[in-house]
Image (cartoon, rainbow, N blue to C red):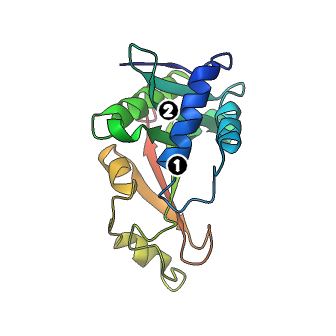
């Protein structure tokens, strides 16, 4: 496996990344990417100037995973969006490799922080399906992963929960914000 830039001229890889996006988010309750056209548009959006779009490919050219990042806050912080790994390849370190590669690429560009939002649209954490407003910080401090939500993967990668936006995707469907410092700030 190797990790390379996704090229705007590589239509087969763009289509494979889009198919991964559709399949990877199909069971999350996400309101995004219901058609191949929507997914292709998301992949193409990641190819804008200044953004990063990287794919993990096997020697045959098959795309195993895709990750994208875009600069924010003058390039000091970057948003990771999205990360997806082919279903039959999960648990093999591909997601970890893609995140590590993205961190390295961002570090080369002077980025200090990598952040993401990881929605809970179908009650896969203790934050889903409840009213968070009475005590958002209390709910965050007691978060539990109930059904293989990606929050745990990102925690293993060194990300910390830095906040949540209650009801971001409808009542009881929050967006959980996570971030990671990429350098020591010196």
Left or right, 120 with reference to 37? left
Q: In screen coordinates, is 66 left or right of 48?
A: left
What is the tally of numbered marks visible in this picture?
Answer: 2
Q: Which residue is drawn at 57% across and 40% down?
A: 77
Residue in the picture at 33% in, 65% down = 145
Quadrant in the rendering for residue 125:
bottom left
Q: Is residue 95 visible?
A: yes
Which residue, given by chain and number where applicable, does mark 1 sit on? 116
Q: Along the horizontal axis of the image, is 37 left or right of 117?
A: right
Q: Where is residue 144 drawn, in percent x and y?
A: 32, 69
| Quarter the N terminus occupies | top left
Mark 2 crowdedness (10 Å alpha carbons): few <14, some 14-19, many ≥20 = many
Q: Position of residue 112 (x, y in %)?
A: 51, 36
Query: Marks 1 and 2: in contact by CB < 8 Å?
Result: no
Q: Label 1 crowding class (10 Å Cα cut-off): few <14, some 14-19, many 20+? A: many
Mark 1 secondary-structure assignment: strand
Please name which of the two marks, 2 or 1, marks the residue nearer to the observer.
Answer: 2
Would you say residue 111 is visible in this rendering? no
- Residue 68: give x, y in percent of width and height: 56, 34
The answer to whether 76 is drawn above or below residue 179 in the figure is above
Residue 176 to residue 7: above or below: below
Give the farthest residue toward the bottom.
134
Q: Where is residue 56 in the image (x, y as percent from the top left)?
A: 43, 25
Report the Cα–Cα distance between label 2 and label 1: 15 Å
Return the residue nearer the eye: 78 or 148. Answer: 148
Mark 2 sits on what residue? 66
């Amino acid at each position: 496996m190797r990790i390379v830039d996704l090229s705007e001229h590589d239509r087969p890889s763009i289509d494979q990344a889009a198919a991964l996006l559709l399949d990877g988010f199909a069971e999350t309750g996400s309101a995004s990417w219901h058609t191949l056209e929507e997914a292709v548009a998301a992949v193409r959006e990641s190819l804008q100037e200044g953004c990063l779009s990287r794919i993990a490919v096997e020697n045959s050219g098959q795309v195993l995973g895709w990750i994208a990042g875009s600069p924010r806050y003058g390039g000091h912080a970057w948003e990771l969006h999205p990360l997806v790994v082919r279903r039959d390849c999960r648990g093999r370190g591909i997601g970890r490799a893609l995140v590590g590669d993205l961190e390295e690429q961002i570090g080369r560009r002077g980025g200090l922080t990598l952040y993401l939002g990881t929605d809970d649209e179908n009650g896969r954490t203790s934050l889903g399906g409840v009213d968070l407003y009475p005590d958002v910080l209390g709910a965050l401090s007691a978060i539990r992963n109930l059904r293989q939500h990606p929050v745990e993967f990102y925690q293993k990668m060194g990300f910390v929960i830095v906040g949540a936006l209650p009801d971001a995707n409808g009542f009881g469907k929050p967006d959980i914000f996570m971030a990671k410092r990429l350098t020591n700030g010196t």
